[in-house]
Image (cartoon, coloured by chain):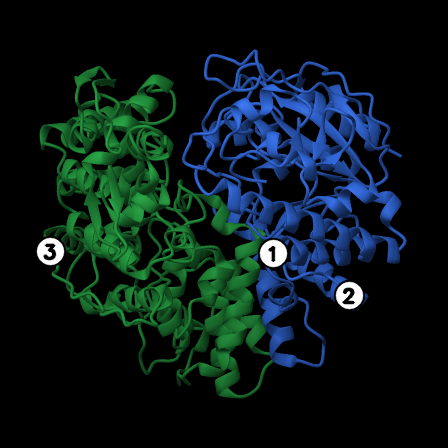
């Protein structure tokens, strides 16, 4: 959820008297909030996710926030909570290395936005897929002589050589070929047409087909929305929540139909939350701690601790109660059975979230 | 025998949107240094911008610009205009008004090889930028921090060179600039901040020009901008010594862009920098269309490749570097070539592989590429099908994305189109 997702609007502290004092223009109507307990509830537009059940991770962030998109995105992508370590690989890439096969055509897949830094891996192959039709050109049927000749010439051009000045370009070519075969089998799997017309929905639909083709993809990464609501938050945010809600609901239904729902966990991340107090022009500046949600085979509930609305940091932002590497450790250990210390520095402790 | 055609192709590739078919041969009697001299000396052209009708959108602007890039006279100035578009970013996705994007484009063109301080002052109160980074809604009572932050972090100084207090102060100093309901930029004193601020060490009742001047005067500014331009042309960041040298040139000239670009391109490191700077999608599509004989009448190919003009994905623009070589764009290029290959002109030559490489301005291709092309063409009959196949392979080859292979010393492999059949190896 790039741009900085406002945790206060997604997971609303409707029972806290400090909330309406901080949020005048951008208050979410407490009477419409989908209560999770008597203090906290989901944004009204997350009705379907609420019905399915969701694990909410409150207060996720870092003890030393940076208000720069790029600095914080780097930390989230690499799993480096404090910005000191700057690993070369991405957190999702390290997960791929831990659970995927180096022989698989693709273990980590980024859909829609180009290569994802989070998916940089050392041993397994991770790819970015822009479009399913484009991908299949390099996996033509044998009847098409010209396309087959093109494919064989292309493959020959991309073979590595001993003294390889073109290593990166040729690797890109070989990745394109591997993925073409994968795309072909995904296209042949057939799709369910009951998705709403949102960008996120079409990307999740593609993800569902790739997962159903069962070719070794273990992590799929996609982004939607611009959450950087410096202005127009009141109009933009409910639309974003609606897109999230409907798209995830359609995705999970699709996975259920394919018998995959118990094998797929959906998690959200964003580089930071938004300023505790709104800026009076119906907008919210960059913040710190936010909230994340997990959907799928999870035990619903609230995890972590809601950040204090009164004890703010020096930039008037919410203080994190869960470190981003603890959130990630939860995914690594509770979902993938990978020790946190294998994929994150410093052995962060997972939250006690039950993930089937 | 000299390296000259490969060197000329390298210069054209980095400083223009070519080389276009046959273009290198038009410089037959000159060497790369002379070609570079001409490119650096060319004055910035006066370009007439298109008229926008009420139904016209940025697609028309994008197609117009792509045509400008493909024009034979397009040189360094055109290339710099693209650089600034990816540097002082604004996206139609949020700006939502073609006229404002056109005005910004005109501004970038006017300043592309001019004075950086003038550019910063102008872009700070540009309508598209005011909307993109929320300046238009910012008021003295409720200042919006977005532009102040990104101006320093992404446009002029870099991360870690300023404080949060500077961001807040800058936002106040800039408040008051807005866009009226006829898409014109205006300053409304009633919306401005009424008081003193301290921004980057400068205290007073500061305005937009003061903010622009303050960032330009920061010691971090010249090296930051020099580094960005170096990366764009050379493909890598300069080392500390080189960065300092370039910053000195930039500062000594009064922040004039042309001398800085000159210093980057005339340095031996530029000619020596092979395989370091993959083509951007725009730099691939613009020469590929004439190579394949296709016509670009829509912008979706660029969208698929990940560089839609007037729609930078975020404030950092389109990053330089190896991401353009990765599986996703490579896959799309293969698809585009095969979708376009019905448009290929039939080219009749005794050595179709050499002819295809020549048309793609690849001089001295690797053995791997030559052999792959020669082998592939044996499976296809028909001159049109053979030509399409070979040209598609040529523009997908690693040599086209980067630079041709390093020529071995002492071996001359120069080939010309001629009536002589090629010698058998």
**Residue A65 visible at all:** yes
Task: Tell me the colour chain A is drawn in.
Answer: blue
Q: Name the residue under label 1.
A: A199
Residue B69 on image: x %, y %: 27, 63
Q: Name the residue under label 2.
A: A191
**Residue B89 visible at all:** no
Residue B52 on image: x %, y %: 26, 69
Name the secondary structure under disc 3: loop
Observer-nearest of B30 and B205? B205
Name the secondary structure under disc 2: loop
Q: Check the residue under mark 3 and report the chain it is in.
A: B
Q: Mark 3 points at which residue?
A: B42
Name the secondary structure under disc 1: helix
Observer-nearest of B139 and B65? B139
Against B40, residue A90 (above or below) is above
Badge 1, how many Cα within 10 Å: few under 14, some, many 20+? some
Badge 3, how many Cα within 10 Å: few under 14, some, many 20+? few
Instruction: Name the residue: 34% across, 17% down.
Output: B165
Against B218, residue B124 (above or below) is below
Q: In this view, does B115 lie to the left or right of B354?
A: left
């Amino acid at each position: 959820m790039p741009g900085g997702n406002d945790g206060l609007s997604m997971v609303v502290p409707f029972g806290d008297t400090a909330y309406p004092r901080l949020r005048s223009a951008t208050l979410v109507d407490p009477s419409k909030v989908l209560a999770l307990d008597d203090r906290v509830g989901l944004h009204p537009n997350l009705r379907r996710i609420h019905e399915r059940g969701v694990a909410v991770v409150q207060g996720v962030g870092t003890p030393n926030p940076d208000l720069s998109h790029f600095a914080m995105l780097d930390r989230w992508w690499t799993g480096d909570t404090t910005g000191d370590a700057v690993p070369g690989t991405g957190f999702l890439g390290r997960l791929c290395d831990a659970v995927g096969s180096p022989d698989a055509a693709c273990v980590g897949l980024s859909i829609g936005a180009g290569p994802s830094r989070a998916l940089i891996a050392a041993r397994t192959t991770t790819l970015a897929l822009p479009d399913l039709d484009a991908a299949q050109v390099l996996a033509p049927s044998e009847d098409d002589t010209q396309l087959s000749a093109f494919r064989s010439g292309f493959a020959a051009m991309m073979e590595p050589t001993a003294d390889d000045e073109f290593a990166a370009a040729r690797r890109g070519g070989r990745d394109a070929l591997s993925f073409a075969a994968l795309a072909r089998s995904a296209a042949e799997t057939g799709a369910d047409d009951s998705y709403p017309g949102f960008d996120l929905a079409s990307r999740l639909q593609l993800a569902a087909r790739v997962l159903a083709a069962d070719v070794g993809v273990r992590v799929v990464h996609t982004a939607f929305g611009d959450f950087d609501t410096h202005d127009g938050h009141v109009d933009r945010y409910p639309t974003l929540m609606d897109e999230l809600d409907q798209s995830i609901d359609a995705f999970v239904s699709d996975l259920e139909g394919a018998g995959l729902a118990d094998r797929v966990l959906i998690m959200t991340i964003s580089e930071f939350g938004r300023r505790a107090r709104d800026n009076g022009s119906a907008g919210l500046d960059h913040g710190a701690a936010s909230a994340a949600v997990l959907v799928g085979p999870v035990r619903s509930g609230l995890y972590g601790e809601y950040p204090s609305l009164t004890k703010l940091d020096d930039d008037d932002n919410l203080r994190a109660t869960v470190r981003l590497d603890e959130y990630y450790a939860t995914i690594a250990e509770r979902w993938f059975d990978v020790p946190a210390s294998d994929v994150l520095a410093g052995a962060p402790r997972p939250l006690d979230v039950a993930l089937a | 025998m000299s390296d000259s055609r490969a060197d000329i192709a390298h210069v054209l590739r980095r400083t223009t949107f070519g080389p276009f078919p046959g273009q290198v041969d038009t410089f037959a009697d000159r060497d790369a240094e002379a070609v570079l001299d001409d490119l650096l000396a060319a004055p910035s052209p006066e370009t007439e911008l298109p008229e926008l009708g009420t139904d016209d959108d940025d697609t028309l602007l994008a197609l117009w610009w792509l045509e400008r890039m493909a024009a034979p006279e397009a040189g360094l100035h055109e290339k710099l205009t693209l650089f600034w578009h990816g540097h002082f970013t604004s996206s139609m996705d949020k700006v939502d008004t073609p006229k404002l994007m056109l005005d910004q484009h005109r501004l970038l063109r006017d300043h592309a090889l001019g004075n950086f301080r003038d550019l910063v002052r102008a872009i700070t109160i540009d309508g598209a930028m005011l909307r993109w980074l929320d300046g238009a809604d910012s008021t003295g009572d409720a200042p919006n921090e977005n532009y102040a932050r990104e101006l320093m972090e992404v446009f002029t100084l870099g991360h870690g060179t300023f404080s949060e207090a500077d961001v807040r102060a800058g936002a106040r100093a800039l408040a008051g600039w807005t866009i009226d309901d006829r898409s014109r930029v205006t300053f409304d004193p009633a919306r401005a901040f009424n008081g003193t601020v301290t921004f980057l060490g400068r205290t007073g009742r500061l305005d937009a020009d003061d903010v622009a001047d303050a960032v330009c005067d920061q010691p971090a500014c010249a090296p930051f901008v020099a580094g960005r331009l170096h990366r764009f042309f050379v493909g890598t960041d300069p080392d500390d010594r080189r960065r300092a040298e370039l910053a000195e040139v930039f500062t000594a000239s009064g922040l004039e862009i042309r001398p800085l670009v000159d210093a980057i391109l005339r340095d031996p490191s530029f000619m020596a920098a092979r395989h370091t700077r993959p083509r951007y999608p725009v730099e691939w599509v613009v020469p590929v269309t004439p190579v394949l004989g296709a016509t670009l009448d829509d912008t979706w190919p660029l969208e698929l490749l990940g560089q839609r003009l007037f729609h930078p994905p975020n404030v950092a623009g389109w990053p330089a570097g190896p991401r353009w070589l990765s599986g996703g764009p490579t896959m799309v290029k293969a698809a585009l070539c095969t979708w376009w290959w019905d448009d290929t002109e039939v080219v009749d030559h005794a050595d179709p592989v050499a002819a295809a490489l020549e048309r793609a301005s690849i001089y001295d291709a690797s053995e791997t590429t030559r052999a792959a092309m020669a082998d592939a063409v044996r499976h296809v009959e028909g001159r049109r099908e053979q030509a399409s196949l070979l040209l598609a392979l040529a523009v997908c080859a690693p040599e086209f994305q980067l630079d041709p292979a390093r020529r071995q010393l002492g071996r001359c492999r120069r080939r010309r189109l001629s009536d002589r059949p090629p010698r058998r190896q």
